[in-house]
Amino acid sequence: SLVYAYLPLVVGTVWIWAFTQVSIGYLNIITAFLAAILFGMAGDYTFHILVSFEEDYRATGDLRKAMEMTYVELWKPLWPSMWTTAAVFYAMTISDFAGFRHFGIIAGVGIVISFVIVLFVQPSLIIFVETYFPKKRKPLGKTFEPSKPLIYAIIGAGVLFTLFSLTQIPKAKFNYNFMDLQAKKDDSIALAEKIGAHFGVQLTPVVFMTDNRATAAEL
């Protein structure tokens, strides 16, 4: 059921925004998108647990035993997966730019919060609903067993794509022109560029913060 998957994510998102309010107090243009990002990333945990539980429950027919098997199967792989993901976000906390620093803090702590919520709320929700409102399930059918040629083909394709990706890394560049991110056919942007070109002024000023007036005068 989708309720099993999405209700823990909603609870986790609420807790993340509560943490954000207490720790930072606000969102910015960078961190405002974290709701969608963390919702999608934490969704991996919910669906892993849900799919594994469904398979174990159909195989055993015992609710609590199936949940226990799911915990045993997924605890070890999901635990390091969560911390490696969080570590990547924590690396952004050393940035001097507040937007990236806040992103790292909220995302790093948020992925841990989401994992903990999913790990405890989702199994409890499943056991409660299946105990009092059980639904009929079909017996576990034959599982798909990939052939060795198919496995080798997938591995080979992954290696080739990885090698190709490595050749593209030097070509990656950072675009500092914010105008390239705006709508190309926006009438207001076209008018601003026309006025700026006519009067020789810039309608999108840039603010520099300096340590003293001498440096400001040089700029």
Image (cartoon, rainbow, N blue to C red):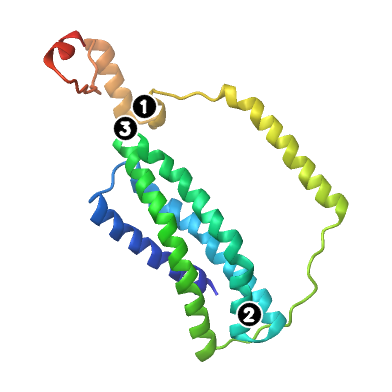
For image coordinates 49% across by 73% down, the residue present is 122
- Disc 3 crowd rating (10 Å Cα; few below 14, some 14-19, many 20+) is few
Instruction: Give the residue pinned by disc 2.
Output: 66
Three-letter amino acid code of the residue under disc 3: Asp
Instruction: Give the residue pinned by disc 3.
Output: 96
Q: Is residue 117 above or below residue 60?
A: above
Q: Is residue 3 above or below residue 93?
A: below
3 or 2: tag closer to the N-terminus: 2
For image coordinates 60% across by 85% down, the residue present is 63
Quadrant of residue 213 in the image?
A: top left
1 or 3: tag closer to the N-terminus: 3
Q: Nearer the viewer, residue 85 or 35?
A: 85
Q: Residue furthest bottom?
A: 132
Q: Where the N terminus falls, by quadrant?
A: bottom right
Instruction: Give the residue pinned by disc 1.
Output: 178
- Disc 2 crowd rating (10 Å Cα; few below 14, some 14-19, many 20+) is many
**In the rendered structure, are the residues bearing label 1 and label 3 in contact, judged by CB atoms less than 8 Å apart?**
no
Percent coordinates x, y for residue 141 in the rendering: 77, 76
Q: Where the C terminus falls, by quadrant?
A: top left
